[in-house]
Each structure stands twice: as C-alpha cells, then as structure tokens.
Amino acid sequence: MDSTQYIQWFPGHMTKTKRQIEKDMKLVDAVAEIIDARIPVSSRNPDIASLTSNKPRVILLNKCDMADRNITNRWIAALSSKNIIALPVDCKSGKGIDKFVPALNTLLKNKIESYRRKGLVNPTMRVMIVGIPNVGKSTFINRIAKKNKAQTADRPGVTRGNQWFTVSKDFEILDTPGVLWPKFEDQTVGERLAFTGAIKDNIMDIELLAVRLLDLLKELKTSAFLERFKLQDEDLSLESYELLGLIAKKRGMIVRGSEPDTERASVMLLDEFRAAKLGRITLEMP
C-alpha cells in the first residue's frame, strides 16, 4: 500500500488562536506548555515556542503513565540541561500536579522578590497554559483549579475561548485553545500526532496509520505488545500490512469467509495504543 500521506489541517479558529496568544502574552509572567510524554517532539508546536520565547517557561510532560518512565527521565534531564524546568505529570490521575506551583515559584523567584521589594507583599503571578489540541490542557486545569470548570473531551478542538482560573492566592492561569500547525513539513510529526489522537481520525487513512504504527511497534518490540496480540518474534519479520492481517485474524476480525478485516483491526490497534494497553511506549527519544 502507498505509504505517502500528506496531512494539512488548520481550521480558521487556529489562526485566530495564534493571534490571541500573541495579544495575551503581555498579560502573563510565564508560560506552561503541556506536551505528550509519548511524543515530546511531535507534540510541541514550534509556533508556540516562538510566540512564547521571551517568557519563562515550564514544560509538563503529560500522560507520563502511558510513556516509558526511563525515557521520560531522559527527556527531563535533556530539558534541564537547557535550563528548562520540566515535570512528568498525568493530568487524569493527578500524578505530579502538586509539583506545578512549587515549579512556578522557582521559575518566577526573581520576579516575585522584585515585586516584594517594591512593596507588593503577595503579588499575583499570571501563567498562560499552551499546547496542541487533545494534549490534556483542560484536564490539567480542572485538576489544578480543583474545580471542573474547563470543558474536557477526548477529542481535539474542544477549548475555544480564553478563560482565567485561580490556582492559589499567588497564581492565576490562562487557558488557551490548542494550536496545530498550518501544515506538517515532516510527515512523521503528523503521523505521530494522529497515533495519539491529536488529529481527528476522519481526515486520515486509518489502515495506513495502523501500518505506520506497526512499523514502530515492530522496532520497539515491547513485551506487552507481543503478549497482547499473542505474537511470536518471527511474526515481526512480516510486512506491517501482513502483520495487521494476522492481528485481525487473532482477534477474530474476519470478512468474506476468511479475509482479515484490516480496517476494524486498525481502529482496534489505535484504540489500544491510545489506552496504553500495548505497554508504556515512548515513540521519540531525546
């Protein structure tokens, strides 16, 4: 099958969001960028990096419970070496969220002290939350603000307008809608975003996406992946489309007598990857 797939997805509201982030940047003291710990490169929009470059930044590696723990630690070390504070968090369970405010205090220590020298005893610091769609911003805000105020959904593009939330007596956070790229110069970035559900499935060729994911899973060869589909090492020498057919048969997904239902198997494979049923997998190394 043709392995070329060009992804371009830039709804009008994203252009508007970029302009809004630029405009609101002057209102905030720092930026918290939420990325997906499984794809720390592909889930960072370079536009956001340039828009927020003049502000102190903390990076939250969300969904850390789905990612390989050792690789996440390597990412944190790599970011720390560039003087970027990075925290592993899992917004759904709340893991690591308690480290956020202390990290902001460290990040903005000099600014807070400068305000206090000017007589502002408890200055309120304002932090903008940024990230691509479906990376967990709203779930994070619900956790950190301890109120179910931000709209959440397990699909991209739910947050639309800007909203302020109080985190503590010293901090307020500004939510922003997710921003994707005008187009993906590197197609692997688009694919990896699609694997994790950051891009809507209905704009993708689902079977091609599953085949591309299997290309990576064959290389990583995690025990959870092999056990989940009862695969042997020799099965991994199959072409990925053939392997998808084998997985379909093993799951009893058959059409027209004995043909494997690869489309149904593709949906299942992506769902199970997104639910971390294939193990704790990180697709990008520092």
Image (cartoon, rainbow, N blue to C red):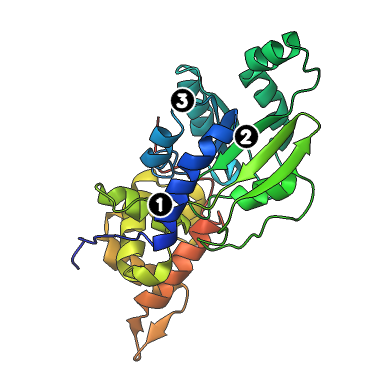
Say which label, 1 or 3, has the lower sequence index. Answer: 3
Quadrant of the image for the N terminus?
bottom left
The reply to whether residue 222 is visible in this rendering is: no
Task: Answer few, some or many: residues within 10 Å of disc 3's Cα (few below 14, many 20 plus, some between 14 and 19).
Answer: few
Measure the C-alpha gap from mark 2 to mark 3.
13 Å
The reply to whether residue 188 is visible in this rendering is: yes
Q: Nearer the viewer, residue 17 or 189?
A: 17
x and y, in percent, of residue 260 in the image: 35, 79
Q: Quadrant of residue 284?
A: top left
Q: Residue at x 34, y 55 (%)?
A: 191
Q: Nearer the viewer, residue 98 or 180?
A: 180
Residue pushed farthest front? Answer: 118
Measure the C-alpha gap from mark 1 to mark 3.
21 Å
Q: Disc 2 designates what residue?
A: 127
For marks 1 and 3, give the one nearer the viewer.
Answer: 3
Task: Answer few, some or many: residues within 10 Å of disc 1's Cα (few below 14, many 20 plus, some between 14 and 19).
Answer: many
Task: Answer few, some or many: residues within 10 Å of disc 2's Cα (few below 14, many 20 plus, some between 14 and 19).
Answer: many
Which numbered circle lies on residue 180?
Answer: 1
Q: Disc 3 designates what residue?
A: 54
Say which label, 1 or 2, has the lower sequence index. Answer: 2
Say which label, 2 or 3, has the lower sequence index. Answer: 3
Q: Residue at x 63, y 38 (%)?
A: 89
